[in-house]
Amino acid sequence: MASRTNSDRTGTVTFGFDWLSVALVLGGVLLLYYVVPMASLFLSVPAGDILARMTSPTVVDSATTSLLSASISTVVATLFGLPLAYWLARTDGAVTKGVLAVVVLPLVLPPTVGGIVLLTVFGPGSPLGEAAIAAGFPLTRSLAGVVLAQTFVASPFVVVTAKAAFESVDQTLEYASRSLGKSRLTTARHVTLPLAGSGILAGVTLAFARAIGEFGATMMMAYYPRTMPVQIWVAFIELGLDNAYPVAILLVLIAAAALLILNTVASNPWE
Amino acid sequence: MTLELSRLRKAYAQFGFGPVDLTVDDEVLAVLGPSGSGKTTLLSLIAGITSPGSGSIQLDGRELVGFPPEDRRVGMVFQEGALFPHMTTRENIAYAATASDRVDELATLLEVTDLLDRRPPTLSGGERQRVALARTLATDPDALLLDEPLSSLDTPIRKRLRDELHSLFESLDIPVLYVTHDQRTATALGDRIAIVRDGALEQVATPSAVLTRPKSRFVARFTGNENLFAGTVTDRTADEAMVQFGDVRVHTTAPNHSASAVTVCIHPSRVEVEAPDVADGDRTANTVTGTVARWLNEGSEYRVDIDIEAGSLALTANVRPPTFERLGLANGSEVHVLIPEESIHLIPDVE
């Protein structure tokens, strides 16, 4: 029996496939599919040319709009998302499942549909939209419109990721803190939040990355002021591919920065 | 300080707790029971982690039910310590401390001064429990609850910490509830022991009473009392009676109940094993003959199973090593077994 096992083993090495190598080859194709276009983007325009065009008013304006709106959206999403995430993490039952499904809905909904949904509530034809316009604070074709669209699409990242982060904090630690005479709020500030911190930061980073890249819902809600994705679209349609490169490169750099944050200070939710 | 629970109840889907009535003075009450019996529920109710369905909990005359954990002045030491992993030992204790000089005072008391700058993940199990205890004491609680603090520790450390806890508890003038599933820890630390079964208190008494006069077969079995036999009480007078079990008939003090069907309970540590060469005339009424069926060296004592009166009963005796060696016991050894009448405890059979 022993000798047979030996010959089987030798046979595998000599004549058989190493399936791990096959997996690596197949995976390698996919990896190239990610990396080659990215490299191609950076190589397709001379660096000096790109730098010159970075300072053009359209690029600067769209970058300002995007950074400002995405920052506001992320703050709003965090402000409202963290309490919901905490509630979801500390409650069980059918209601919790239902609420979670509602939270995930914007993630699976096509963004353009999200935009339409938002327009029915905030659009110029809706009572709320009309009232806002009358008050001089239009909710579409404005920074507010951009923020509304981005928050809708990006906030679930905060809720879902922070929920997992809160769940990873042993509830016994919260009970321990409270039995030491500390209120719920003190406990949240000194025990729960610090321990869930890196997970929450991951959710916030993801939300920011999603918000700054938001296109579909933003197009529907606020074509103006132009965010970077909208600016890429406009430049591509009106002036051709070459003119879309500078903003696209900016967005790639921002995405890379988000990845860097996820892999250093935040806890990468996919690891 | 007195902790008083009355008609305390809590219903779960699979499990009902209570009603429990219990008064704990400035003493250590060891709460002993199998896992799932409701020991932790009892502590959670007192600490305010769970709220009862009904009933009241009073500490020093102050009602606790309805108040959040932070307003109860009840300290709780959790099973694995529940130290905050992102804080150093010093920060953990200081987080709870009512005054800053308490940190060093308690660190000295619990011998954790060397650990003050370390974080909990780098501490051993025993060190963690010391710090957890220091942290809880830093709040100057009016009652102290401990949930199996020693259960995850190795035997030598557990024994050492148990001894230290014993003297520490004596210096505290507050009610202490110590939950454990280990009978030795319960008898070593408890001024009284409460046996919990299926969410109710089966017996609350001193350690020796629980060991030698268990209220039920459950208490007897859970406290290591292996000698339980179905018996019948006969010839009952005002202060004495005979009890028959198997082919054995022994003399005992009269039971304080009128049942004739009883469970005879004889703690293995109260049974005396003697050499068979004692003349028959010297035999008292409660000496029976038997043969050693098997024995086990349990370290500090031998556990000897003896077939009594030609195998009609299997009695277990704890024998101290000097006696075991003097008698030269081995499988098949003939022995005389003395059952002192005060050690024969009768549990009335219910139903």
Image (cartoon, rainbow, N blue to C red):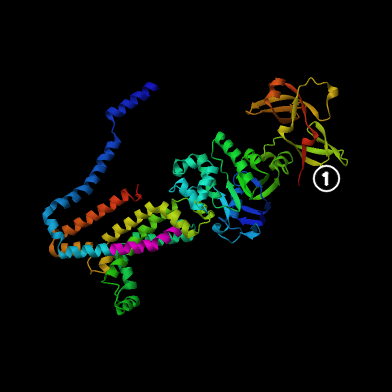
Q: From the viewer's perspective, tell me whether residue B247 is left or right of residue A151.
A: right
Instruction: Identify the chain of the residue marked 1, using the numbered disc in the image.
Output: B
A72 in the magenta segment: yes
Q: Is residue B103 visible?
A: yes
| Residue corresponding to mark 1 | B258
Q: Quadrant where the N terminus of chain A lies?
A: top left
Name the magenta segment's main secondary structure: helix
* Image coords of residue B345 (percent x, y): 77, 39
Q: Which residues are magenta?
A: A69-88
Can you name the residue that lies furthest to the front here? B101
Instruction: Residue at 50% x, 52% y: name it.
Output: B100
Please tell me which residue is depicted at 11% across the width and 56% down the height of the picture. Answer: A49
Q: Residue at x 59, y 39 (%)?
A: B164
Q: Residues within 10 Å of mark 1 (few under 14, many from 20)?
A: few
Q: Position of residue A227 (x, y in %)?
A: 23, 64
Q: Is residue B128 above or below residue A122?
A: above
- Evaluate whether residue B132 shows in this view: no
Relative horizontal placement of residue B190, taking residue A243 as reference (left or right): right
Q: Is residue B49 magenta?
A: no
Of A179 and B134, which appears nearest the observer?
A: B134
Q: Secondary structure at mark 1?
A: loop
**Type of amino acid under label 1:** Ser
Residue in the foreground of this view, choosing between B186 and A5:
B186
Q: Position of residue B172 (x, y in %)?
A: 62, 47
Q: Find residue A169 and report its horizontal and vertical position in percent.
A: 45, 51
Q: Based on the displayed image, in which of its 4 quarters is residue B314 positioned?
A: top right
Along the line of sight, which residue is nearer the eye, A20 or B17?
A: B17
